[in-house]
Image: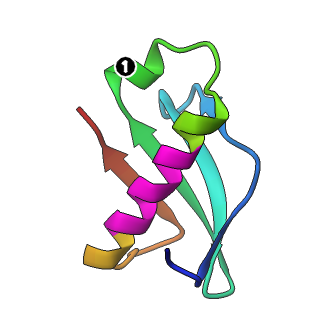
Amino acid sequence: MNQNILFNDDLAFDKKHDAWCLTALLSAQVITVYFHSMQLKSLEEIDSCTKFDLEEIVELWLEKNEPEASTIHIQMR
């Protein structure tokens, strides 16, 4: 687990980006993470188990990538 990232409990669907999103604190910077997925898009709400999985996906993404700005867009299948 990446100890440098703290996830906020604000997972919500963003109509503008047509994706689920959440915010997190990464090294004292607030970032917004968008999850682009057809499967997720069809859900009315996301349960805590799926939310945990999404947070893990972000941690794995951060192990291989550096955010270029205050937003991260993760394309999922």
Is any part of residue 35 visible from this angle?
A: yes
Q: Quadrant of the C terminus?
A: top left
Residue holding disc 1: 39
Residue 13 at x, y percent in the picture: 61, 29
Asked whether residue 5 is drawn in magenta, I would say no
Q: Residues within 10 Å of mark 1 (few under 14, many from 20)?
A: few
**Which secondary structure type mostly characterizes the magenta part of the structure?**
helix
Say which of 17 and 29 sits in front.
29
Which colour scheme appears in the figure?
Answer: rainbow
**Magenta span of residues:** 52-61
Residue in view at x 49 percent, y 34 percent: 17
Residue in view at x 48 percent, y 46 percent: 54
Say which of 33 and 5 sits in front.
5
Residue in view at x 76 percent, y 49 percent: 9
The image shows residue 8, relative to residue 6, as above or below, that is: above
Q: Quadrant of residue 39?
A: top left
Say which of 74 and 16 sits in front.
74
Residue in view at x 62 percent, y 13 percent: 44
Is any part of residue 65 visible from this angle?
A: no
The image shows residue 21, relative to residue 28, as above or below, that is: above
Asked whether residue 54 is drawn in magenta, I would say yes
Identify the amino acid type marked 1: Gln
The image shows residue 44, relative to residue 5, as above or below, that is: above
Residue 40 at x, y percent in the picture: 44, 24
Q: For the residue labelled by badge 1, is the local secondary structure a helix, a strand or a loop?
A: helix
The image shows residue 45, relative to residue 32, as above or below, that is: above
Residue 45 at x, y percent in the picture: 64, 20
Q: Is residue 48 left or right of residue 61?
A: right
